[in-house]
Image (cartoon, rainbow, N blue to C red):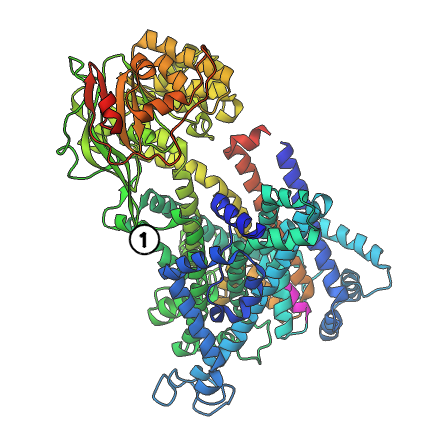
């Protein structure tokens, strides 16, 4: 694999702006020049081409364009006679003789429309191509030369972008001699800036990527970097710029010609409309004179827009309308979808803590249902958390810890579905709650501290308003009262009340996380879920935050579901620990037992992955290469309060 | 504040570019269009007017830099010469008499399209897979593919000529004259409906799709999940948390798209013979009225830049992160 292939693949995955293919060549025959300039790795290209072909919008769009290209090419064969021939049978409605009727001058509308396609499509694609070419040049030049060149180019681009296009077109066209050449030149002058703006920022962002730096370090020449490293990765956006440029070209040409500013003797869709309007076709009710040309412009633009839209969707799948959801649209703010089977098939496995536990999760199964395959995120997970207890959920990234945490509050969204199991909070079934009950349950009974405090605060709302929201929603107090209590909460986590008026970006990372923790305890919930609460923070701040949480727990006495991959931190804080692997719980025991007498080989590997602070030096041993656990069974109680999933080493246990 | 001043400087620069363009065009275009104009209309003008126009278009012996400095001075003082097609009214007066209608038409259509489009976009993104999300976008993309003027012609034919529901042309009925009376306002409103609706119909789809796509990205943010976890009511999450953030890019694109709206309004004005500056611009071109043409172009540019500047000020109010820096 060459450097280019690997780098473009990496970028495509990371930024969603990787190489995107051109649709089949003949569809955009005049466009193939620009599309071919993006030389991305062939394999990646074919994959994307296939997904474009599978996209119904893309196929429809390409179909429309192919049809019109064919009509334009075959106009001499298809058209009934000379479009410019003036006859004495003027303003005839559609008939057998003239399928689309005749104009006021007796010209055949069908012939005019077919011949018009030639000029309109030609000018449109030429304008799109030229504008894109200027855009690519400006983009590459700005990215390559940087500094003053970039400043000047971007300034020029922004100025041109701001000048009102059509009035400028009209003024330019008024001073230039009429003709198709003028129209093209004028359209490129007014149209290049839009393309340049997009492509410049794209080229700049690609230039900043690591692989370009790598190529620079390895001593690649400037030309090589521009054309082999930067340009191929712009292929997708170049493509959509081109499509946009063609839409602009066709539309603006029609507009100019309709105003009589083009060469009115040329047959094109725009001049057809100009003559229709000039001859007063509307006033005499000759709708057939202006309908076909306008429809053609709209259809071609629609085809291009569809294709553009499809290209967007293929690179950014989130934009696609979820197919399955069409029958039952769901709004955000409601709970995770719970399938009918849930709540029945659960076999109760877990500890008996005596009274009704705070949280009781039984056989919880969560599936992510994709269009092609279903992934099980959590598989028959069962555990309980008692009053005031700290339960740690450990496991590697992707094992389903967060899925379980989010499922408890039913925060998972499409395509996640809870397919089996029950979640009981103080005996109440969470999965059967109505949206309204769920809303009341959230935060009052169970609150959550999310992983990244920066991202879990709304950047455009003050910290005070975001805390106050909790009180105004759940306790229906006045805003003033809510803000007063928000101030108290901030003081509880040692932040000055004056910070109520701060926006999240004005706080340090540690402060933001403390704000989030303050919000979590606002309503004194009985259970606090903490999903990697300190992962994004440095070690010193981490310690402060954990001390803060310990203080609050002493004061308020809530139970905690603690999720982290930091085993030492977890063992230090938790009363009991559950270890998850591939969506399954493989071991559950009091924290000291997990540390001193882990039973499941995976738990042992997890514990062994951290060096002990004391004792002799020894080699750290993780799981042996290639070891995978499959078909993990239900937990079995092997000792009091110590539950382990059956595994190969059971005999020795 | 620094941000606002920097933007102001930028808009002044943009205006200077368009003034310079205006200065250069008649002087360096092939075919000497200005001489044609003089040949056609010289007989009607007084010697002073001829001298003034010759100065404006560089048909005298001053060096180019002197012409340029004088031209800049003329633009700043609003000295744009007399209109030729509407002789002998000064250009400034012609524009002043018509810009109101353009602001009325463009402003009404723009406000409605922006509000409606953004609202539809918010709702579509909120109910993914709902009717708004599945069916409306393709329909609006299709409608948006039609040329402004063609849709305007269609509307004029259907609702004006065939059905007779709306007047065919102009901004008010023949025989009445502008006044702040109930009758006149109702008459003007009736004349406004068709042109405004066509602009809204063509442009609303773009707003909706842009808002929908930003909303979808915003809805995946952690702070939206957090807001859900907080048990906030859906309406509050939708507007105060999601839409409030998603509208920031929309505000920026508002300024950008203003130029297009002006262009669309121009074509619509031509179809409906609506007496705004767009209609007048075309008339000026057809009548080889270069002074008026230049005046209108500069006025439109200045208006677009001014609105962009106002939008920037609003943006600063909306995004605390920009306010701070």
Task: Inspect this view and state whether residue A451 appears.
Answer: yes
Q: Look at 75% across and 60% down and name the residue there.
A: B24
Depicted A549 relative to depicted B265: above or below? above
Taking depth in this image into account, of A465 and A320 the one nearest to the observer is A320
Range of residues picked out in magenta = A167-176
Please identify the quarter of the rendering in which residue A426 is found. top left
Report the side of B317 relative to A558 (left or right): right
Q: Main secondary structure of the magenta part?
A: helix
Q: Position of residue B120 (x, y in %)?
A: 36, 47
Q: Position of residue A51 (x, y in %)?
A: 40, 57
Depicted A215 relative to depicted A579: above or below? below
Report the side of A351 relative to A49 (left or right): left
Taking depth in this image into account, of B110 and A628 the one nearest to the observer is A628
Residue A70 on the magenta span: no
Taking depth in this image into account, of B54 and A249 the one nearest to the observer is A249
Depicted A467 relative to depicted A553: above or below? below
Q: Position of residue A515 (x, y in %)?
A: 43, 19
What residue does disc 1 label?
B134
Q: Residues within 10 Å of mark 1 (few under 14, many from 20)?
A: some
């Amino acid at each position: 694999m060459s450097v280019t292939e690997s780098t473009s693949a990496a970028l495509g995955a990371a930024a969603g702006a990787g190489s995107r293919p051109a649709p089949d060549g003949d569809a955009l025959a005049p466009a193939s020049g620009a599309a071919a300039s993006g030389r991305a790795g062939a394999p990646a290209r074919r994959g994307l081409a296939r997904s474009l072909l599978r996209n119904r919008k893309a196929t429809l769009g390409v179909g429309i364009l192919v049809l019109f290209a064919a009509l334009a090419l075959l106009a001499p064969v298809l058209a009934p006679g000379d479009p410019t021939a003036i006859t004495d049978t003027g303003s005839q409605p559609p008939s057998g003789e003239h399928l689309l009727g005749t104009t006021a001058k007796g010209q055949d509308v069908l012939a005019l429309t077919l011949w018009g396609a030639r000029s309109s499509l030609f000018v449109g694609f030429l304008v799109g191509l030229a504008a894109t070419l200027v855009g690519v040049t400006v983009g590459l030049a700005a990215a390559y030369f940087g500094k003053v060149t970039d400043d000047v180019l971007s300034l020029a681009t922004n100025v041109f972008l701001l000048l009102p296009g059509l009035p400028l077109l009209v003024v330019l066209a008024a001073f230039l001699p009429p003709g198709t050449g003028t129209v093209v030149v004028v359209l490129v002058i007014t149209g290049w800036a839009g393309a340049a703006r997009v492509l410049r920022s794209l080229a700049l962002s690609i230039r900043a990527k690591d692989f370009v730096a790598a190529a620079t370090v390895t001593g690649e020449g400037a030309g090589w970097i521009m054309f082999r490293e930067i340009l191929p990765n712009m292929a997708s956006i170049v493509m959509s710029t081109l499509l946009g440029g063609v839409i602009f070209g066709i539309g603006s040409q029609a507009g100019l010609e309709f105003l009589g500013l083009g060469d009115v003797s040329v047959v094109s869709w725009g001049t057809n409309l100009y003559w229709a309007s000039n001859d007063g076709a509307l006033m005499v009710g000759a709708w057939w004179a202006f309908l076909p040309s306008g429809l053609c412009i709209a259809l071609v633009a629609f085809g291009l827009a569809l294709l553009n839209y499809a290209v967007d969707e293929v690179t950014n799948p989130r934009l696609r309308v979820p197919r399955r959801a069409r029958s039952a649209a769901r709004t955000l703010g409601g709970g995770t979808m719970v399938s009918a089977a849930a709540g029945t098939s659960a076999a109760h496995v877990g500890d008996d803590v005596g009274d009704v536990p705070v949280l009781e999760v039984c056989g919880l199964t969560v599936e992510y249902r994709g269009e092609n395959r279903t992934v099980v995120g959590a598989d028959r997970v069962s555990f309980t958390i008692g009053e005031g207890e700290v339960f740690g959920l450990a496991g590697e990234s992707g094992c389903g810890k967060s899925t379980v945490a989010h499922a408890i509050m039913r925060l998972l969204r499409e395509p996640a579905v809870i397919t089996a199991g029950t979640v009981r909070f103080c005996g109440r079934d969470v999965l059967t709650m109505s949206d309204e009950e769920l809303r009341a349950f959230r935060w009052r009974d169970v609150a959550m501290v999310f992983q990244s405090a920066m991202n879990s605060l709304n950047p455009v709302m003050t910290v005070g308003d975001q805390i106050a929201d909790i009180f105004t929603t759940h306790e229906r107090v006045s805003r003033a009262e809510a803000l007063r209590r928000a101030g108290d909460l901030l003081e509880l986590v040692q932040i000055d009340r004056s910070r109520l008026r701060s926006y999240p970006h004005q706080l340090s990372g540690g402060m933001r996380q403390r704000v989030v923790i303050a919000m979590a305890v606002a309503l004194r919930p009985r259970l606090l879920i903490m999903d990697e609460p300190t992962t994004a923070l440095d070690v010193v701040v981490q310690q402060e935050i954990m001390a803060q949480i310990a203080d609050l727990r002493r004061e308020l006495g809530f139970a905690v579901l603690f999720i982290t991959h930091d085993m030492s931190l977890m063992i230090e804080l938790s009363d009991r620990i559950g270890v998850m692997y591939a969506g399954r719980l493989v071991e559950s025991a009091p924290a000291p037992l997990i540390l001193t007498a882990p039973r499941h080989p995976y738990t042992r590997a997890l514990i062994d992955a951290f060096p002990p602070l004391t004792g002799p030096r020894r080699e750290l041993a993780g799981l042996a290469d290639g070891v995978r656990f499959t078909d993990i069974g239900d937990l079995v109680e092997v000792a009091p309060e110590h539950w382990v999933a059956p595994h190969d080493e059971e005999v020795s246990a | 504040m620094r941000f606002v001043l920097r933007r102001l400087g930028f808009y002044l620069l943009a205006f200077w570019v368009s003034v310079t363009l205006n200065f250069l065009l008649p002087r360096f275009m092939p075919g000497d269009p200005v001489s044609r104009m003089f040949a056609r209309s010289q007989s009607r003008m007084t010697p002073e007017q001829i001298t003034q126009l010759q100065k404006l278009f560089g048909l005298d012996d001053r060096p180019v830099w002197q012409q340029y400095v004088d031209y800049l001075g003329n633009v700043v003082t609003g000295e744009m010469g007399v209109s030729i097609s509407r002789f002998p009214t000064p250009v400034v007066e012609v524009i002043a008499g018509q810009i109101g209608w353009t602001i009325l038409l463009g402003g009404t259509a723009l406000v409605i399209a922006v509000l409606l489009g953004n609202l539809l976009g918010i709702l579509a993104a909120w109910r993914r897979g709902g009717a708004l999300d599945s069916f409306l976008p393709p329909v609006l993309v299709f409608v948006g593919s039609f040329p402004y003027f063609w849709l305007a012609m269609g509307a004029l034919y259907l609702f004006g000529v065939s059905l007779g529901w709306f007047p065919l042309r102009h901004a008010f009925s023949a025989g009445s004259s502008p006044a702040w009376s109930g009758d006149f306002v109702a008459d003007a409103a009736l004349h406004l409906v068709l042109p405004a609706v066509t602009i809204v119909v063509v442009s609303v789809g773009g707003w909706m799709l842009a808002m929908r796509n930003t909303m979808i990205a915003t809805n995946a943010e952690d702070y939206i999940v957090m807001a859900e976890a907080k048990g906030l009511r859906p309406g509050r999450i939708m507007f105060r948390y999601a839409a409030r953030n998603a509208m920031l890019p929309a505000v920026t694109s508002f300024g950008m798209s203003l130029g297009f709206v002006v262009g669309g309004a121009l074509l619509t004005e031509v179809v409906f013979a609506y007496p705004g500056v767009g209609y007048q611009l075309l008339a000026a071109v057809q009548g080889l009225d270069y002074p008026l043409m230049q005046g209108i172009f500069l006025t439109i540019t200045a208006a677009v830049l001014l609105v962009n500047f106002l939008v920037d000020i609003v943006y600063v109010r909306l995004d605390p992160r920009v306010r701070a820096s």
